[in-house]
Amino acid sequence: MALPQNKIVRWIDHRLPVFTFLDHELYQYPTPKNLNYWWNFGSLAGIVLTIMIVTGIFLAMQYTPHVDYAFDSVERIMRDVNYGWLVRYIHMNGGSFFFVLVYIHLFRGLYYGSYKAPRELLWILGVVILLLMMATAFMGYVLPWGQMSFWGATVITNLFSAIPGIGNDIVTWLWGGFAVSNPTLNRFYALHYLLPFVIVAVVGLHLVALHQHGSNNPLGIDHKGPQDSIPFHPYYTIKDMFGLGVFLIVFALFVFYFPNLLADPANYIPANPLQTPAEIVPEWYFLPFYAILRSIPSKLLGVCATVGSIMVLFIVPWLDTSKVRSAYFRPVFKWVFWLLVFDCIVLGWVGAHRPEGWFVIIGRIATFYYFLHFLILLPVIGWFEQPLPLPPSISSPVLNKGGRRPAAPSARRKP
Amino acid sequence: MAESAQSHTGGAHAQEGTRRDFLVIAANALMGVGAACAAWPLINSMNPARDVLAAGAPVDIDISSLQPGQQILVLWRSRPVFIVNRNPDELKQLQTSQDTSLLRDPNSDELQQPPYAKNWHRSLKPQFLVLVGICTHLGCIPEFTPQPGGALGADWLGGYFCPCHGSRYDLSGRVYSGVPAPYNMPVPPYRFVNDTTIRIGENPPDSSWDFGSIVQI
């Protein structure tokens, strides 16, 4: 597409090439023509990040970060502020849905091998975003200063006390006092406001890395020429918009009809530093990690395993030894992938229950399998697995399926 | 400039390192030190402020109405502190092998108490127990469950049970083996001002123990 011939546009673009940039990255941007709906979740997560920042800024205008006023200021937002209930419910459920989208996005990457060369840094930046999201979500959950806020903050900050030697000093430093208290709430508020903008910056880098080599695709093979791609606009803008519409229907269902389904009722009790709730359960998106923490009977090793369960994602590009990206052509990996999905769901289920009886045993098996998948199965399967023949190009399977052309000779790629 | 460019490419000089290399390394190192110095006030500003520390001054607790078998919960440095008046049966229980053989650290070898509480009753006077009521696992408040048996099983001897992750302690705050908590519950510095008043946060006159030296809160 040529740029608009408007003189002002051309004058600006000659000095500050924003229009050329947008044209290049959002309009012309050549995108594989075979992307399926699993490729919607990245842009959806970006839209939800925007929603979170916008609603968060308006909530910040009404919220008071002080142990004596925080809980009441949130209740005031719910009862007295015009549409405060709506803004808060969007923000609260938006956090959960952000994790839903990002987890799907992450598993999409694992299934289609989107982390393989030359997209290793793209993947690593994604894991950095996940870590930042976890920190932001955790600190945001502390702000309403309910029972779960207080005790969740106590348990999570105490994870650092497992560090030998300097653990206690680090925890005191994190708290700014002798326990989770007003200084803690204040700094969590400051950081909860800051980190989303850091996430935006890392998302920017994530997009730069993405656009360097373009999107991966369901076949996981490289783009061979212009016949394999279509411009981003209008083909994928419209597909993303349709996906957004479907997402917003589900999201609205939660915001308007089940706003507290994903929340813990104990967080509507003001924080009481002298009364531990009968059971401390994190938000659902932390449950698998919580299950790993509780499965290991040693405190230090439990913390190491929990941190390691995320850190292992950083080295996935080098743990997977198969040269074939997409699980579509990997008969063994395909099954192992679904086992991992099942394993994570089991971990989440175990994390929601007290560590007693069978839950301990199931939790330990599931924790063991989680690490087995990444550290053993991923490298070993790559060595012995015989992948299916790869199609010669992105276009050929589509055209063959239509029966309009004789079958193209398919190349077998060596693993 | 031409000379230094030559010396960069020259084999013998490059190995020794030139005057310019030295200056660049020294300048960068000094910049690193400067950056660390500039960051330190910011990092240290997050440590407990003076008013927070001042609010952590010793507190006096009147225990004249604390009956045998009772526990009271008080606050010291925004932390819960348990004060228990243990009855003779409970004290006898603490010395049986039925109890001590199941403990992770029965002799309080880990530094989780002042030297004057490193004994079987982990206190100054056997009868009165003073503990920082925080589970050494992840910071929940363990429940005072002195009655043997009950919901915690027939072999439960009485003690503390943490509802968060199931850690168990005996009536001296000593942790049992096989639970997530790694250490005994900490004993704070304290002394008896008189027979019925405990001052928490201050050592007896003959001790200068620092609470910050314990292994873990």
Image (cartoon, rainbow, N blue to C red):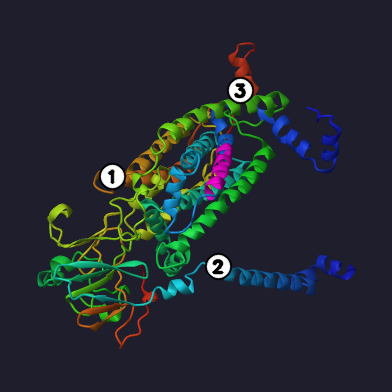
At 60% across and 20% down in the image, what residue appears?
A: A397
User: Do discs 2 and 1 belong to a common subunit?
Assistant: no
Q: Nearer the viewer, residue A177 or B65?
A: B65
Kindly state the secondary structure of the residue where label 1 is placed: helix
Range covered by the magenta-colored residues? A46-60
Residue where numbered disc 2 is placed: B43
User: Do discs 1 and 3 belong to a common subunit?
Assistant: yes
Q: Which residue lies furthest to the top in this view?
A: A404
Q: Mark 2 lies on which chain?
A: B
Q: Nearer the viewer, residue A209 or B58?
A: B58
Q: Assign the magenta stretch its main secondary structure.
A: helix
Mark 2 vs mark 1: give the one in front.
2
User: Do discs 3 and 2 belong to a common subunit?
Assistant: no
Mark 1 vs mark 3: give the one in front.
1
Type of amino acid under label 2: Ile
Label 1 to label 3, Cα distance in Å? 48 Å
- Asked if residue A377 lies in the magenta stretch, the reply is no
Residue where numbered disc 1 is placed: A359
Type of amino acid under label 1: Phe
Instruction: Name the image quarter holding residue A180.
Output: bottom left
Label 3 to label 2, Cα distance in Å? 60 Å
Q: Where is residue A86 in the image (x, y as percent from the top left)?
A: 48, 38
> How many numbered discs sit on the rendered protein?
3
Q: Which of marks 1 and 3 is nearer the N terminus?
A: 1
The quarter of the picture where the C terminus of chain A appears is top right
Q: Position of residue A93 (x, y in %)?
A: 46, 39
Instruction: Name the image quarter holding residue B67.
Output: bottom left
Residue where numbered disc 3 is placed: A410
